[in-house]
Amino acid sequence: MAIQQREKNMAEAGSAVAQSAKDVASKTSDAVRDAASTVAHKAADAGSYIAHKAEDATAAVGGEMKSLAGTIRDKGPHEGMLGNASSAVANSLESCGRELQEHGLTGIAEDITNTVRRHPIPAVLIGIGLGVLLARVLAK
């Protein structure tokens, strides 16, 4: 009978140890899940902050481009071939600057996407050409 009692006590002790291990594993799993959730939220917040700053920087660049266009118009030649060229450059800078200020990077990405959808073959050929050019530059 003493052997049976010892076996019973050992079984109960083993069961208690197993239950303790399950409790520790559950608590550890909860802690890991909470930590992962916190990291995910922090990463999302950081990504949002970076995207906002990139849009702000893009708008600032657009403003500077428009300012440069005004400077070219004011100080560049107004007549002849150089006058036409400086006017064309100023118009292009102003147009691009306005686009950057109004639509930002998202608008530019949408424009590129739409252009590639409308003209897929030239887009692929341009991509291949840029890849070859980049490979040559990096191979040197």
Image (spheres, rainbow, N blue to C red):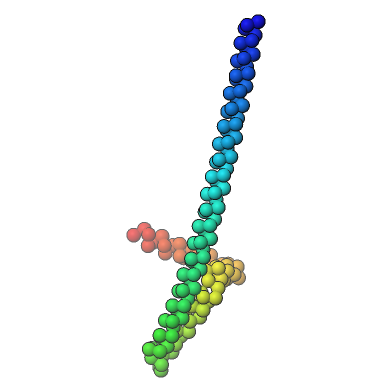
Q: Toward which corner of the image does residue 64 lie, by quadrant?
A: bottom left
The residue closer to the viewer here, 137 or 36, is: 36
Residue placed at 62% from the left, 7% from the top?
A: 3
Residue 115 shown left or right of residue 140 in the figure:
right
Horizontal relation, residue 8 to residue 139: left or right: right
Tell which of 118 and 74 is nearer to you.
74
Whether residue 89 is visible here, answered yes or no, is no
Point out residue 84 in the picture as x, y percentages from the top left corner.
Answer: 43, 89
Quarter of the image where the C terminus is located: bottom left
* Figure label count: 0
Residue at (41% x, 93% y) in the render:
78
Q: Quadrant of the N terminus?
A: top right
Q: Front-most of 56 and 79?
A: 56
Image spot of residue 121 (x, y percent): 56, 67
Which residue is most to the bottom? 79
User: Residue furthest toward the left?
Assistant: 140
Q: Residue at x 37, y 62 (%)?
A: 137
Name which quarter of the figure residue 34 lies in.
Answer: top right
Visible in this render: residue 77? yes
Q: Nearer the viewer, residue 101 or 83?
A: 101
Q: Position of residue 95 (x, y in %)?
A: 50, 80
- Provide residue 71's location: percent of width, then percent of height: 40, 85
